[in-house]
Image (spheres, grey):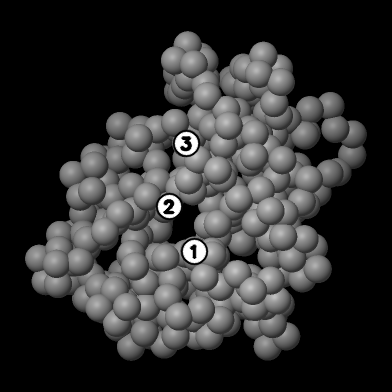
């Protein structure tokens, strides 16, 4: 079973992150983003049962907002959804019965019969790795999802879960979700990277835009753009980070595209990446997704950008 979540040549090869829905942007704003994403060919959306869980009763959580949009737009058979379980206050942990209930609730909120993928949102240290493997493998066995994966696991536990799933139920853990961007290149060559390669897991690369830093929108910004500006400028205030940003700007200007497009295209260029995952707060920001889908970076440009790993080390 393929773990490639990319769209075809006619659409953006990335996944829209749903963490902002019902949190940073309202339901109407979220629907506008989803409408535009679908319009430009986007078909993959990432969410979690833990996003905005305190608002769930009002159907203002990410899954419910996405589900209501799917029903309203009539696109249930045209989009693929990935959700994560294990961190929601309503269904915490990865015990088999907890996961089964969490997945069922997600399917109900999303209004679909099958998910593209279900990921363990984080490790459950109270369980053995075979127990976690059984909980996740059962999802595929019940046909509730085509694939399973892991998020926020260390390399040892990820390796053990993958081995247990394969040996106990012949279900492969096909996806790994971790932060990976020009600003966070540490995954390359890491122990977790080696585990992913050995186990056949491909990366759903979150944080592709580094909380907006790699879009360049904070360059010369006066005052507060929002909480992301504060986070990004504090985290990436050093000279090496701005040297990388300068390189992104240089490549973007050469191709006549937005800086965000270059940042996303760089992530997508790596063979171990199944799909970049990026979130936006307005429809206009999705133009960069469309540009990224058509952008072909040269080997020299990829090397120029990748050298930021040395700058940051």
Q: Which residue matches tag 3?
A: 268
Q: Which of marks 2 and 3 is nearer the N terminus?
A: 2
Find residue 5 and name its label: 2
Quadrant in the rendering for residue 186: top left
- Residue at the location (26% across, 59% down)? 1
Expressed as whole percent of the image width and height from the top left, the position of residue 230 reads: 75, 43
**Distance between the Cα atoms at labels 1 and 3?**
18 Å
Q: Which residue matches tag 1?
A: 80
In the visual, does 144 lie left or right of 281?
Answer: left
- SS class, disc 1: strand
Extreme-right residue of the structure: 222
Q: Which class describes the residues within 10 Å of circle 1: few (<14), some (14-19), or many (20+)? A: some
Evaluate if marks 2 and 1 touch, with contact meaning CB atoms under 8 Å apart. yes
Expressed as whole percent of the image width and height from the top left, the position of residue 27 reads: 77, 70
Expressed as whole percent of the image width and height from the top left, the position of residue 164 reads: 15, 65
Q: Which of 313 and 54 is in front in this view?
A: 54
Evaluate if marks 2 and 3 touch, with contact meaning CB atoms under 8 Å apart. no
Q: Which class describes the residues within 10 Å of circle 3: few (<14), some (14-19), or many (20+)? A: many
Q: Is residue 52 above or below residue 286?
A: below
Foreground label between 1 and 3: 1
In the visual, does 143 lie left or right of 69?
Answer: left
């Amino acid at each position: 079973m393929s773990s490639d979540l990319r769209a075809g040549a006619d659409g953006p090869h990335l996944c829209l992150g749903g963490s902002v829905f019902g949190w940073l942007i309202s339901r109407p704003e979220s629907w506008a983003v989803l409408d535009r994403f679908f319009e430009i060919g986007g078909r993959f959306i990432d969410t979690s049962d833990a996003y905005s869980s305190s608002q769930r009763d009002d159907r203002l959580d990410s899954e419910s907002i996405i589900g209501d949009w799917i029903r309203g737009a009539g696109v249930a058979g045209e989009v693929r959804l990935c959700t994560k379980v294990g961190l929601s206050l309503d269904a915490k942990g990865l015990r088999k019965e907890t996961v089964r209930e969490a997945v069922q609730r997600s399917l109900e909120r999303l209004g679909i019969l099958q998910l593209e993928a279900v990921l363990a949102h984080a490790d459950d240290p109270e369980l053995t790795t075979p127990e976690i493997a059984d909980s996740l493998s059962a999802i595929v066995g019940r046909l509730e999802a085509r694939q399973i994966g892991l998020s926020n696991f260390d390399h040892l536990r990820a390796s053990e879960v993958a081995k247990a799933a394969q040996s106990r139920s012949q279900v492969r853990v096909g996806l790994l979700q971790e932060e990976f961007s020009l600003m966070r290149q540490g995954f390359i060559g890491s122990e977790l990277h080696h585990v992913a390669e050995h186990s056949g897991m491909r990366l759903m690369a979150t944080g592709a835009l580094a909380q907006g830093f790699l879009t360049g929108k904070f360059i010369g910004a006066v005052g507060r753009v929002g909480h992301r500006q504060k986070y990004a400028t504090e985290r990436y205030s050093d000279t090496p980070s701005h040297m990388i940003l300068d390189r992104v700007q240089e490549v973007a200007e050469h191709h006549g595209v937005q800086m965000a497009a270059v940042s996303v295209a760089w992530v997508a260029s790596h063979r171990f990446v199944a799909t970049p995952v990026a979130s936006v707060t307005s429809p206009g920001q999705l133009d960069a997704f469309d540009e990224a889908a058509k952008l072909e970076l040269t080997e020299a440009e990829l090397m120029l950008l990748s050298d930021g790993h040395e700058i940051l080390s």
